């Protein structure tokens, strides 16, 4: 245990790419997150697990700047990019790093009125003002990477769920994000389609992509994740490097949570 | 009925008279169509505004217009506005204003439901990818909303053209009014109003069909 703790401490010494600092979030009277602090280091693959309703999605949405924290802040490379007040400099900082944060959603959220290629080049063209031929070249390279070159001109409705999610990952990668957030990217998929998406995610992890992954895929967290974060009722209950969380969960809540995956 | 002697020459003999009414109907419809779409946009924007008084205004106005008869509104604009505000509005202007507002209030609902039918996740994905709110609306939300909007918009257009016939009541010389005048002098309502019904059908039906085809082409993707 000591050895692991030491390695863990070493692992934490880099500069974090993005940090949730004491983030709380309430919706009306409902406190969904309570002072959650989570730094994500470069090349980290942080897996967030926990029961339904524990606030995992809300945490991710705060980091993706889709929700404003009620307390605390989101910091990217030393700069606050989201605070409860959303002051002017914070907003400006957020705009500057907007495309450094990518997100993959549970329900893919591809734009149905655009072809696969158009989905991929839209943000580079509009948000980065990239020349079209360059955007297309990048998109084609990414489509090859997720093994969907033949679907370049198809519309999303014609693709399987697994294919749609791989397109969504490619679309996020097209903006060359520094960190990629996944919110249960495989939960909406049939079991036989999950593998193809998990393979892509695993490949990204191996290439050194910094990832924050909310998932119910315990095998992915155990074998691909560098850190596992266990959330329950809006709090981070336990945090451990890689597979240590699964081999020796310290808290009773985590033990109970893991038991349900044992059958 | 079998003994009835059709006298279609009543129609053909007054072709010019009826044609001028037909032209007026087309002009009224075209102008009103554009104005109603603009009015609808304004009302929809008010409805969805984050500024509460604007929202109340949009919703209140829309509800009143949608829940009172068009004919009463036209009579109101034509007869009441001059009394209350002392402005005498020409019948034609009254018809165009009244009809634009009326159809605009319905079109506003069409716009609103079209925009709200686009899943939030689509614009959240765009937001995370760095599209500005304006780009998000024009590139992601609007193209999808328009598709949802086409069929109800088409039926609104058709309705608008048909409702322009109510102008006859406030003596706007569109085709229905012309028909009323002609039948008063010739006592031949059967031929005249049959002809006029066919004229409306010939304008409205192709319009409805055209939009349906366009819609099908968009859906084929
Ligand atoms: N926009 C919102 N308004 C009100 N309540 C919300 C909102 N978003 C989330 N919540 C509430 O916050 C709590 C946590 O939700 P969240 O989606 O973050 O959980 P989760 O851990 O992602 O759950 P799951 O595993 O089911 O996806 C839930 O009780 C949910 O009802
Ligand atoms: Mg969730």
Image (cartoon, coloured by chain):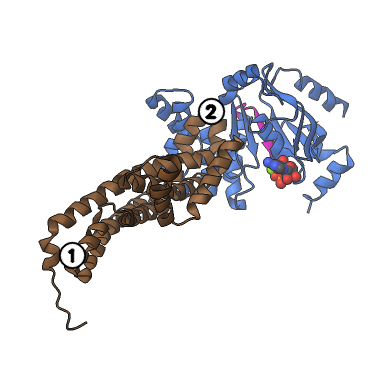
On screen, residue A66 above or below B94: above
Element type at marker 1?
A: helix
Chain displayed in blue? A
User: What percent of the width, then of the height, locates residue A120?
Assistant: 47, 34
Q: Chain of mark 1?
A: B
Picture residue at 50% right of the left edge, 45% below the top:
B112
Picture residue at 22% right of the left edge, 54% below the top:
B22
Disc 2 within 8 angstroms of ligand 1 (CB): no
- Can the viewer see residue A115? no
User: What percent of the width, then of the height, locates residue B165?
Assistant: 31, 57
Q: Which mark is residue B130?
A: 2
Quarter of the view holding residue A33: top right
Element type at marker 2?
A: loop
Shade representing chain B: brown
Q: Please name whichever residue, B197 or A234, is drawn nearer the observer in this view of the structure.
A: B197
Extent of the magenta region: A207-217
User: Marks 2/1: CA distance?
Assistant: 69 Å
Q: Residues within 10 Å of mark 1 (few under 14, many from 20)?
A: few
């Amino acid at each position: 245990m000591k050895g692991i703790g030491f390695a863990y401490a070493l692992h934490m010494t880099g500069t974090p790419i993005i940090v949730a600092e004491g983030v709380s979030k309430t919706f009306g009277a409902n406190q969904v997150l309570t002072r959650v602090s989570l730094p994500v280091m470069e090349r980290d693959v942080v897996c967030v697990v926990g029961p339904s309703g524990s606030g995992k999605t809300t945490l991710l949405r705060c980091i993706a700047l889709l929700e404003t924290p009620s307390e605390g802040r989101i910091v990217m490379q030393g700069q606050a990019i989201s605070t409860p007040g959303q002051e002017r400099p914070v907003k400006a900082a957020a705009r500057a790093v907007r495309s450094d944060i990518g997100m993959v959603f549970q329900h893919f959220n591809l734009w149905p009125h655009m072809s696969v290629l158009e989905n991929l080049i839209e943000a580079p063209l509009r948000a980065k003002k990239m020349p079209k031929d360059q955007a297309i070249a990048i998109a084609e390279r990414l489509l090859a990477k997720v093994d969907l070159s033949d679907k370049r001109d198809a519309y999303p409705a014609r693709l399987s769920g697994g294919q749609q999610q791989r397109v969504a990952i490619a679309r996020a990668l097209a903006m060359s994000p520094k960190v990629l957030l996944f919110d249960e990217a495989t939960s909406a998929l049939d079991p036989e389609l999950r593998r193809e998406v998990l393979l892509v995610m695993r490949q990204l992890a191996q290439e050194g992509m910094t990832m924050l992954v909310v998932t119910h895929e315990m095998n992915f967290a155990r074998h691909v994740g560098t850190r596992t974060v266990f959330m329950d009722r809006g709090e981070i209950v336990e945090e451990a490097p890689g597979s240590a969380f699964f081999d020796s969960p310290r808290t009773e809540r985590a033990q109970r949570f893991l038991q349900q995956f044992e059958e | 009925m079998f003994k009835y002697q059709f006298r279609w020459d009543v129609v053909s003999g007054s072709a010019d008279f009826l044609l001028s009414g037909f032209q007026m109907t087309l002009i009224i419809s075209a102008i009103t169509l554009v104005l109603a779409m603009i009015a609808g946009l304004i009302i929809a924007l008010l409805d969805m505004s984050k500024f509460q008084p604007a929202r109340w205004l949009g919703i209140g106005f829309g509800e009143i217009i949608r829940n009172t008869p068009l004919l009463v509104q036209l009579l109101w604009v034509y007869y009441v506005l001059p009394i209350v505000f002392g402005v005498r509005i020409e019948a034609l202007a009254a018809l165009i204003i009244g009809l634009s507002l009326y159809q605009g209030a319905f079109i506003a609902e069409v716009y609103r439901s079209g925009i709200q039918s686009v899943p939030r996740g689509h614009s959240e994905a765009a937001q995370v990818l760095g599209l500005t709110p304006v780009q998000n609306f024009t590139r992601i939300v609007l193209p999808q909303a328009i598709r949802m909007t086409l069929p109800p918009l088409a039926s609104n257009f058709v309705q608008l053209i048909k409702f322009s016939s109510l102008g006859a009541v406030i003596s706007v010389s569109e085709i229905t009014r012309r028909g009323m005048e002609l039948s008063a002098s010739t006592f031949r309502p059967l031929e005249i109003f049959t002809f006029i019904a066919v004229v409306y059908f010939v304008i409205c039906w192709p319009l409805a069909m055209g939009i349906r085809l366009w819609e099908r082409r968009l859906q084929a993707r």
